[in-house]
Image (tube, rainbow, N blue to C red):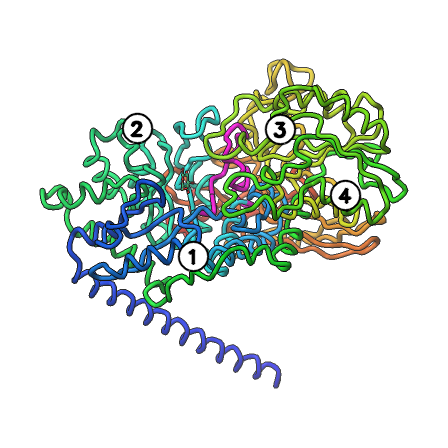
Amino acid sequence: MRLTCVSVSLRLGLASLLMIGATAMSRAQDDIGSRVNVLLSKMTLEEKVGQLNMVSNGATLRWEDIASGRVGALLNFNNAQDIARAQAAVRQSHLKIPILFGLDVLHGFRTQFPIPLGEAAAFNPTLSRLASEWAAREASYVGVQWTFAPMADLSRDSRWGRIVEGFGEDPYLGSVLTAARVEGFTKGGLATATKHFAGYGAPQGGRDYDTTYIPPAEMYDTYLPPFRAAVEAGSASFMAAFNALNGVPSTANPWLQTDVLRRQWGFDGFVTSDWAGIHELIGHGVAANGAEAARKAILAGVDMDMMGELYVRYLPEEVRAGRISEGVIDEAARRVLRTKMRLGLFDRPDADPGHVDAIFPSTEARQAARKVARETFVLLQNRNNVLPIVPSARSIAVVGPLADAPQDQFGPHGARGHAGDTVSVLQGIRQRAERSKIQVNYAPACDLFCKSTDQLPAALEAAKASDLTVAVFGEPVDLSGEAASRAHLTLNGKQAEVLEALAATGKPIALIIVGGRPLELGKLADRIPSIMMAWYPGTEGGTALADVLFGDVSPSGKLPLSWPRTVGQLPLYYNRLPTGRPTLENNRFTLKYVDEAITPLYPFGWGLSYTKYSYADPIIAKSRLKPGDTLEVSTMVTNTGSRAGQEAVQLYTRDPIASRSRPLRELKAFDKIALEPGETKRVVLRVPVESLGFHQDDGSYWVEAGTIEVFLGGSSLAEKVGEISILETFTLPLSGQRASSSTMAQ
Ligand code: BGC
């Protein structure tokens, strides 16, 4: 009885605290609202438009524009000296409105963490938060305030070079990780610009900047959820994408920038264009000149012009000529100023030029980078248990152009990463091998682009003289990232030839792939017993990889995308729709290629360990679910091997009969657990019944009555473990915030 009273009074106490918190918050918002209005009332039209202008550091920057209030944000200022100099220039302006300093800080500032696609392979939002927080801590130390990250673009096409900057092909994994990244950056002191809104990850043919066609319902179901998760996690701003979506460039797309983002999701921060994105409306063929481009972009809801200078050049005149009302400019300026106030820029001291990033990577930052990196490696295959390297090994050959490539280890957007800080793969292996008194024989085999095989004989010698070869090949950083679409996904240059020759030595060989996307392995998948994807692992990549190669830590990464056998299979993704002619081995007229298997080489969610896990019969807590209920699946997972490890337990569902075809499988929940040898843990995965539906083209969301199949396991090949029934069909309103109980006829 007493306990009940205590808990009631505690709850009352908590409720009143929350109310006080909410009231204080809304008072603070009101304060900001009125401060912004006072400020706006003092501003000329030119000064308001100045707040909407973002300019890059570099030759074209005019410092006098900063001092005359014509610049609201600056990008590519990456050190405290430059930032402090710009802040001093602001002090000469009429209203001294602080400038917002933005930079591409994606996966580290000075200390480089694994690239986002690799980080996604960790299936561990806690680590995503940690990596982003560190990136933000270091960048904000030198005065950077805003990052053009996270990239929330889902992609199912590895030809697209920017797939490296995201989380892969799955909307649920993408939503969880995008939210974690927004939270991490924000906690570390950087406001986020979640990008690129929207559909940029699905360009035709995988060609960066090319057009995208995605039907609205598919946008809502697949491409928009990670962005929505960013709004809910508190992203301060968004960046419009370069691409046209269904024929309307995102930068001039009111459906995206206003209807969805603001009206449906309630976002009240600001939207910036991408680099010269407003000017590119002319190239897209929707604006005849700069003035029209500026008008279309601002009317669509793009508040800030990154590196176009079209807003400052044309908007004042557009207002005076009556083509745009001044209210539109006021609203855009209000969003920018409100964000600056929320970030506390008006009350912050200027950057301290004494704050230099050379104090990083600190020991703590290095430890964090190592901790994150070692969970990102995906052991794709490991025949004959070639890995881990056994303590009895006397010598190993380290071969390949990416074994000692510290700069390429960063991947695209290396911010202030220094090659000199990096522990290369070779260094990491050497340090660890020394501890076990194992000799290391190093031979690069060829240059980064592997144009010639001149150095192959030395590499073959090294392999023959060693017990095991660790071959480090893959994609030099120039082949990955923005403007690095690839029509061929083969290992570049003569890498495959070199690897064939190494395999032909008959020595055990482990291939470590460094790169930003899956590569076509062809026959190498048969010829080489052990293959591990290491992505671009960052500053501590070498130490982290050595931890895993030598078995100090078991690999636990899982693929955040389907690994194609060949480029011709793209786009390829596990959560595809069923067809009327599912693949049948003996029937030509079913879903297949005549010259290639239909399946990926390695499926989504796939990744081996040095140990094995068994799943006890899963229990579904309740099999008949009403609106508001939760699908709850529990199981006991046991580490049945002799090494400690971590397993990402994954839950998938399928709606086999619905009013529209639904995916064969959809990831709905996952949890990563650590298990000692012989240890068992209970894992409980929960999915609200509200997450088991799908959108219509108008954005409404339906959960239909009927059966849902449930799958549980360590990859997207997970076994079916049961079924549940949803008892009634219901919809969620456009904003998706509350469940409506209205029952709809099926
Ligand atoms: C990229 C953005 C990036 C911006 C600023 C553009 O080319 O598309 O992702 O944030 O440049 O560097």
Asked whether mark 3 and ligand 1 are closer than 8 Å, the reply comes as no
Asked whether mark 2 and ligand 1 are closer than 8 Å, the reply comes as no
Q: Which mark is residue 80?
A: 1
Quadrant of the rendering where the C terminus is positioned: top left
Residue underneath mark 4: 430
Q: Is residue 660 above or below residue 151?
A: above
Residue underneath mark 3: 448
Q: Which numbered disc flags the more N-terminal residue, 1 or 4?
A: 1
Element class at badge 2: helix
Does 492 sit left or right of 139 as displayed? right
Residue found at the far left of this picture: 321
Element class at badge 3: loop
Q: Which numbered disc flags the more N-terminal residue, 2 or 3?
A: 2
Q: Residues within 10 Å of mark 2 (few under 14, many from 20)?
A: some
Residue at image position (60%, 58%) is 362
In the image, which is nearer the foreground, mark 2 or mark 1?
Answer: 1
Q: Which numbered disc flags the more N-terminal residue, 3 or 1?
A: 1
| Rendered location of residue 348, percent (x, y) | 37, 66
In the image, which is nearer the foreground, mark 2 or mark 3?
Answer: 3
Element class at badge 4: helix
Query: Start and end of the magenta stretch?
Result: 149-173
Does 260 sit left or right of 331 as displayed? right
Q: Residues within 10 Å of mark 4 (few under 14, many from 20)?
A: many
| 159 within the magenta span | yes
- Residue type for callout 4: Arg
Split into quadrants, the picture shows ligand 1 in the one at top left
Does 375 sit left or right of 245 as displayed? right
Cα–Cα span, label 1 and label 4: 36 Å
| 434 within the magenta span | no
| Rendered location of residue 236, percent (x, y) | 39, 55
